[in-house]
């Protein structure tokens, strides 16, 4: 995990060096099942050049109870949204999603679908980092995410 900030910097540098991307900010809230139920709140950056391939980077906090003790885990994630369907009535309403998320307790590759990039449903498998787990509970196995991504421009327009 110590190399992750360097990797994130390299990815961002590569994205901006190839072409000019439009960046959109989003707030995300959701539910994560990782051998335990967690609520999630955080933020994401969406990098958009065209609407066939979209990149997202995010950071959030997972909050929940593990072994009857409240716990908070930081989470970072990177996603690629894909949709190459052309000439449809409701163009690009859904995207296939592939990504990876990581905390200080596990790393989980994931796949899923997203509706307009706003409502995500993903699943994957988590691989634990270390032996301690979270409050003694191992963070490995099935990983399910249900997330609502709210663009900050929508919030700005709603309250003005």
Image (cartoon, rainbow, N blue to C red):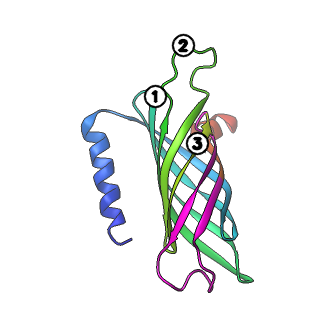
User: What quarter of the picture does the N terminus occupy?
Assistant: bottom left
Name above or below for residue 6 compared with residue 122: below
Mark 1–mark 3 CB contact (< 8 Å): no
Write the residue at 56% across / 45% down. Answer: 26
Crowding near the residue tagged with mark 3, few <14, some 14–19, many ≥20 C-alpha atoms within 10 Å = some
* Residue 151 percent location from the top left of the image: 59, 40
Quickly name the residue at label 1: 52
Q: Quadrant of residue 70?
A: bottom right
Q: Which residues are magenta?
A: 116-145
Circle nearer the N terminus (1, 3): 1
Quickly name the residue at label 2: 87
Circle nearer the N terminus (2, 3): 2
- How far apart marks 1 and 3 lie (CA) works out to 22 Å
* Element class at badge 3: helix
Circle nearer the N terminus (1, 2): 1
Name above or below for residue 41 compared with residue 92: below
* Element class at badge 2: loop
* Residue 91 percent location from the top left of the image: 58, 20
Per the rendering, the mark at residue 152 is: 3
* Element class at badge 1: loop
Residue 134 magenta: yes
Residue 32 magenta: no
């Amino acid at each position: 995990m110590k190399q992750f900030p360097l990797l994130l910097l390299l990815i961002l540098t590569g994205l901006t060096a190839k072409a000019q991307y439009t960046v959109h900010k989003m707030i995300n809230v959701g539910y994560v099942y990782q051998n335990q139920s967690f609520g999630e709140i955080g933020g994401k950056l969406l990098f958009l050049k065209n609407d066939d391939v979209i990149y997202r980077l995010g950071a959030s906090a997972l909050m929940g109870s593990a072994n009857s003790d409240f716990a908070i885990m930081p989470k970072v994630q990177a996603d690629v949204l894909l949709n190459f369907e052309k000439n449809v009535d409701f163009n690009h309403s859904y995207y296939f999603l592939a990504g990876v998320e990581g905390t200080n307790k596990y790393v989980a590759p994931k796949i899923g679908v997203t509706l307009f990039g706003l409502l995500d449903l993903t699943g994957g498998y988590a691989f634990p980092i270390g032996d301690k787990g979270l409050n003694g509970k191992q963070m490995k196995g099935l990983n399910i995410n249900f997330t609502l991504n709210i663009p900050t421009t929508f919030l700005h327009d709603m309250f003005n």
